[in-house]
Amino acid sequence: MDELLQRVAELRGMPASLVERSAQARAEKTGTSVEAVLQEWAGEEHDTAERTQGTGDEAEPAGAQEPAPEESDVEPKVEVTIDYLVQLAAEAKRMPPKLILSSATARAEHSNSSLEIVLADWAGVDLEELKKQEKGGSRKEAATQEPPTVADETPPADQEPAPNAAVAVAAAAGAMSMDELLEKVAEVKGMPAALAKRSAEARSKKSGESVEAVLAEWAGVDPTTVTSAPAEEPVVVDDGQQATDDTPEPSPTAKVEVIEASPAAVEEPAEDEDIPVVRGGYPRWLAAAFVLIPLLAVAYILVVPNGPDCGTAGQLLVDPATGEAVNCDGSDYGVAAIDYFAAGASIYSQCAVCHSSDGSGGAGPAFASGAVLSTFPAGSCDQQIEWVRLGTAGWPDPTYGATDKPVGGFGLMPSFGGNMTDEQLASVSLYERVEFGGQPPEEAQVDCGLVESEG
Amino acid sequence: MLRQARLEFLPPTEDSPKTSHQEDAVSVTADISSNDVAQAEAADNGTAMAGRYLLVAAVLFATGLVVSALASLQLVLPNLLSGSAYTTYGRLAPAGRILVTNGWLPLAGLGLAFYVVAHITGEQVKRKTLGTVALILITIGAVVAAGTALTGLSSGIQGQEGPIWARGVSAIGYVLATFAITATARLKADRLGATGWYLMAAAWWLSAGAVFGLIPLTGGTPGLIQASFANAGLNRLFVITMAVGLLYFALSKISGADVTGPRPLAALGFWSLTLTWAFMSGVNLVYSSSPDWYETLTIAFAIGTLVPVVAIVTDLGLILKGRVQGISDRATLRYAIVGGLALVVATIVNLLLAWRATSAIVQYSTWNVGVDMLVALGGGSFAVFAANSVRRGGGASDASSHFSWSVTGVVGATTALLAGGIVTGFSWISGPSSQLFSNYGSDYEIAVVSLEPFLWIAAISLTLYAIAQIAYLVRINSTSDVELGSPESASEYDLEFEGSTRYVTWKMLVWGAATVWVGAAVLTAALPMLDSSEAAATITADRFRTYEPGTPELAGRDLYISLGCAECHTQSVRPIITDVGLGAVSVAGDYANENPALIAGIRFGPDLMHVADREAFDPSSVAQHLVNPRAARSWSIMPSYSYLLEADINAIVSYIETLR
């Protein structure tokens, strides 16, 4: 026995007396003998030692650290642990336990419910019933449950030791004697009272709070909650590390919980590390985004492997002769961009009053059947524009056009220069010449100055 | 630091009520192998090494910022310091950029990596001599490269202005420092966690990018693709990876969250960041003469950068979730949040720069500078500030004015540059589409004048930012005790967690990083270089753009490079609306006889690809414009080159005449 103790103490780098006490506590809890526990620790140490070495650790000053004894994986009686529930649910749902756990974690986060409740639901068991059955049987489980109210009421610990809070807790604890408190803590934390006392003393020395206040905090003593039913939403700690990550409230109480639960957590690394732990629960749509974004990228490559088509994303065609960027129809950029013919057509509605919409004339002369080109032949669109601009009143000569028509011979031609731009005048002339005169559009555009001739 | 003792069964050896919150978290470690003594020494060494790096880095940073601020002021006050070649915009701008991106960022990143890696592994810094030698080499490399740009000996390759030996010295420095950090990290490879993965990979990208940059440049467009890949490794992939690593470090330390465990989002963010940013070096080349498939690939990976940004931001958010109230170190928190936001915005604007529909508007505008500034001065610098704030013991009360001035500077400058880029882009489009004005010659007034207010805001903001850094540096040094971070102050954050190698083991990290990098180098640098479909020299190249030794044309081209004309003038006509009227669309073969090709990446002035072909071109007026740019065009922001000899002016004019 002593040899075992020494061996474990050496392996753990902690005083033999502490090892003994821890082993006793452990034995008491699990219902095995102290020796068995010690043997287990001594034997199991190989794993741990390997792990330690795996991390490349070398300096391990004795006394500088104080690892706690590890617990055995074998629990003598059924406890309502997460693992147990997972197992039940896995059986019920015929799914692998890992999948069950990850799904349940996600569901729990999604539905704001506890993991236990979800699992019990899936397993088809009554959680309350189970708890009653194992009532008092699993202190470990109890230790991991925390009335949320306590966490809420405790101020963040990184502030200077808050005297108010300490006093309040102490006052609340005042109702209980020191021994009662110790017992309570021992029960909640699942450790021997003596150990709890020492820890509390150490803590109080460090934080400046009284031992009672520390104990009360750990016990989760709160006159209002202590007697009430177990928490509705227990903080489930099945992995010390996960707890660190996931504990939503970094309140000192929660931390204390984790501390005390960590011995349990350390022993099960082999199992726990294989469990895909869904951390923190990110929104579901993120997973969709992680799939959709790469798909979008791949789709982009497939759709436009060699750049966009002309006309999209600002892309133009490159004229093979000149190398310059041109419109998608091969015309010079800017020419087809404005449809002068269409613009002229809409302006012509003003002219149609006298010249009629089909150019057959009325109060004014007809344009149709080439009449407009006989008056203003190819190359003299500028004359036509000038005539429309000035009208009969402003025209300087007695006649106009190639056929020397007398000004005023067909009545009054209004002057449009005042309310039309040069471009509009040219556009309407272009329309008349192309639509009624039959002049080719490209030629008419150059004729009317709507596109620069090449050069 | 024995107070990290596990559980609280023993009385702590040190009383520090202030940190009881963190110690609670410390107790969680449940780590059987606490290395308190070793950690104390390691923290000391890591701190000292980081202190050395950061001190030099800060000096380079301050110098680079002053130079950059001066350059940015010259864009609005073109006569400022215009009497000398050494202070001309084309030389100041690259010099400032080199000091910041090749001096400050690598030194700050590597220095903090020394500290962080030692800190999270609990190991002493290994290969300290190498680390110090590396510091000296990197400093020499950066200073020489900046000096090269200032004295007009630039290689003409943007981002790699220094002579090859100076860049080699830098590269050796990066490699040695990386080697030293890696030697420390691998001792506890399984404890690196998200922080460690990112910082290690960042150091490797830096080294790989710098070594790749030493490969002699191929001529023409392929050379530009090659240079882009090297630059993107240094200026984007490295900076962003480093910044994320530092943000993980800072946020986990101040919040007490464990980031060494298996974090699926961190791992997803890491691998996707590695994959996407490594492959998208061509964002500045979209619509240029590079192969279309290469540009498409770049854009696809730019779309992919949304994955890491979503994953990382969510994961960082989860670190903070529920813990923000408990964080007493608000100064670090603020830096970290701004750094994180800047990285998000940088990712998005980078995507818009590449995405063709938006690229057609903002490419070659100040948007390009805005992206670089967001990465370097937004994400990069604020992540460094945050991590350094932790290193200095956190909660620095003197940080609040530094924070507000820095934020004002970065936000002002980047907003102005991005907004200015959009305005410029639309002004370029409106010319050809309205047929009212062209995008060169005296018509370029519209583009210059519309950009001017934005340039003013950017220049003033950058000046503010520079002043903030210098003021902070001076103040820190007057309290130098804190600056180097005694172990005592640093230890306030000593948390120790059990590591996990679930998603990123050391082997995965090394081989994954190497594979991705090689893949990126092959796919986005080697293949486009080998793509000869358009590489054959065109008539343009053979008739005009061939430069024989001893000719005034070549002398003029050398002056064009030396004076940094390419800082403001592109030589690239793209098949998009903005460039209609600038002449024939450029193809890769146009640059086949040039090394380096002077395509450049920004147009403060008009494009010069076919300047000599334009109807109003007149050699004598070019000479006059060089000597007194504001004689004929009062709005011009071009520096005056009146200090040049007449022969030099004539040489430049002869070179310009070949641009047809």
Image (tube, coloured by chain):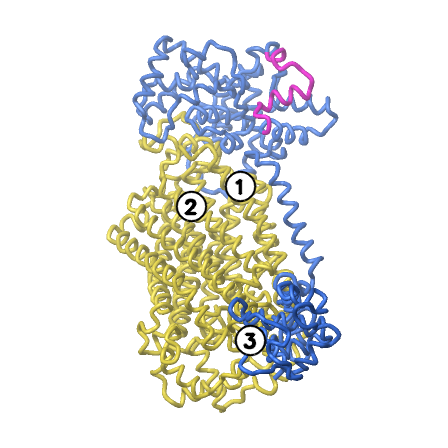
In the image, what residue type sits under mark 3? Leu
- Say the numbered circle drawn on residue A404: none
The residue closer to the viewer here, B409 or A74, is B409
- Circle 1 — which element? helix
Q: Position of residue A178 (x, y in %)?
A: 37, 11
Mark 1 → mark 2, Cα distance in angstroms: 14 Å
The residue closer to the viewer here, B390 or B552, is B552
- Say the numbered circle drawn on residue B582: 3
The residue closer to the viewer here, A320 or A241, is A320
In this rendering, the label closer to the viewer, 3 or 2: 3
Q: Do labels 1 and 2 share a chain?
A: yes
Tell me: residue B50, above or below residue B234: above
Residues shaded magenta: A110-131
Mark 1 surroundings within 10 Å by alpha-carbon count, few (fewer than 14), some (14 through 19), many (20 or more): many
Q: Which residue lies furthest to the left in this view?
A: B478
Quadrant of image for the N terminus of chain B = top left
**Chain drawn blue in the picture:** A
Specify the subunit that label 3 lies on.
B
Mark 3 → mark 1, Cα distance in angstroms: 46 Å
- Say the numbered circle drawn on residue B314: 1
- Circle 2 — which element? helix
The answer to whether B266 appears left or right of B324 in the picture is right
- Say the numbered circle drawn on residue B336: 2
- In the figure, the shade used to draw chain B is yellow
